[in-house]
Amino acid sequence: NFRPSFATPLGIFGGIIYTALYFFPFRGREPFTLRNRKSDHATLKKAKDCTPIQYPKPDNKISFDLLSSVALTNTNHDHDQPSHLTLKNDS
């Protein structure tokens, strides 16, 4: 509900007022819902219209490669266990 509150005619002030009402008197249980003007999928762009992000190579001090990061999570599972995700149409 926060994002639509900033899209009101009052702009940032409307968002601040709504946020204050949300937290203090209503404690997150307001009896109404603000709606977005557009649905999420209508705001997306095609991948071909966007410029790719060029990420720097891992420096092994602040950023790490993917395999090192996964190893640090200490995830434990059998490597031959079946996937729990299924596709309706896998073609």
Image (tube, helix red, strand yellow):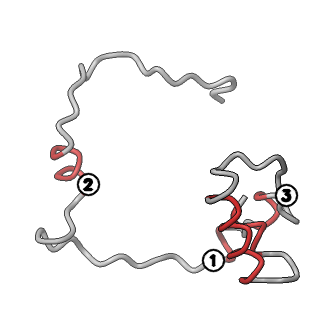
Q: Residues within 10 Å of mark 1 (few under 14, many from 20)?
A: few
Q: Secondary structure at mark 1?
A: loop
Which numbered disc, 3 or 1, marks the residue that appears first in the sequence? 3
Q: Residue 71: where, in percent of width, then height?
A: 16, 44
**Lateral position of residue 15 relative to residue 71, left or right:** right
Q: CA distance from mark 2 to mark 1?
A: 24 Å
Q: CA distance from mark 3 to mark 1?
A: 27 Å
Tell me where residue 6 sits by quadrant. bottom right
Residue ID at (26%, 54%): 66
Q: CA distance from mark 2 to mark 3?
A: 38 Å
Query: What amino acid is found at the position of numbered circle 1 in the picture?
Result: Cys
Residue ID at (51%, 24%): 85
**Lateral position of residue 76 relative to residue 56, left or right:** left
Q: Residue furthest top?
A: 81
Residue at label 3? 35
Residue at label 2? 66
**Lateral position of residue 60 relative to residue 36, left or right:** left
